[in-house]
């Protein structure tokens, strides 16, 4: 069965899945980076800053995953950095997977 853009449904679903993983990683990376920058700018009063709190909530699930995969001797204050590094590897992996998938099904179908 063919869909309108010429790819079969499983290829389209795989592209959607890879793109979704990449997008989630990008949003989380930007939230963690924004939280770090805002923490530098706000200083000691960062916990009272509404935007810092919002970014902290966006990044919190990924920081919790970082806690699960790191040894107990890793300090709590380093967990956002660990989460950022893990997400960077996920993003690179998703980018490579998307490039490979697009080369497989045809670059014109990935636009």
Image (cartoon, rainbow, N blue to C red):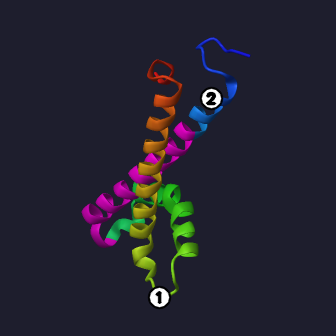
Q: What stretch is highlighted in magenta?
A: 18-44
Residue at x 29%, y 64% (from the top left corner)? 42
- Coordinates of residue 21 in the picture (x, y in percent): 54, 45
Which one is in front, 20 or 48? 20
Q: Which mark is residue 11?
A: 2
Above or below for 72 versus 17: below
Q: In what element is the residue under mark 1?
A: loop
Residue at x 51%, y 83% (from the top left corner)? 71
Residue at x 49%, y 24% (from the top left corner)? 110
Residue at x 66%, y 22% (from the top left corner)? 8
- Coordinates of residue 79 in the picture (x, y in percent): 45, 73
- Which numbered disc flags the more N-terminal residue, 1 or 2? 2
Q: Residue most toward the front?
A: 104
Give the mark toward the camera: 1 or 2. Answer: 2
Q: Residue 18 carries which label?
A: none
Residue 89, located in which quarter of the rendered image?
bottom left
Q: In what element is the residue under mark 2?
A: helix
As for residue 47 lying within the magenta part, the answer is no
Q: Alpha-carbon distance for marks 1 and 2?
A: 43 Å
Label 1: how many Cα within 10 Å (few below 14, some 14–19, many 20+): few
- Coordinates of residue 32 in the picture (x, y in percent): 40, 58
**Residue at image mark 1:** 73
Which one is in front, 104 or 99? 104
| Left or right: 37 as drawn, with respect to 76 | left
| Left or right: 61 as drawn, with respect to 25 | right
Q: Residue most toward the right?
A: 1
């Amino acid at each position: 069965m063919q869909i309108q853009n010429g790819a079969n449904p499983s290829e389209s679903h795989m592209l959607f899945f890879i793109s979704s993983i990449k997008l989630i990683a990008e949003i989380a990376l930007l939230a963690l980076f924004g939280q770090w920058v805002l923490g530098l700018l706000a200083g000691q009063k960062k916990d009272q800053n509404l935007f810092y709190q919002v970014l902290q909530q966006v990044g919190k699930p990924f920081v919790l995953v970082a806690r699960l995969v790191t040894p107990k001797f890793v300090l709590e204050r380093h967990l956002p950095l660990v989460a950022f590094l893990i997400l960077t590897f996920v993003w690179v992996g998703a980018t490579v997977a998307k490039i490979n998938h697009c080369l497989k099904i045809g670059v014109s179908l990935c636009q």
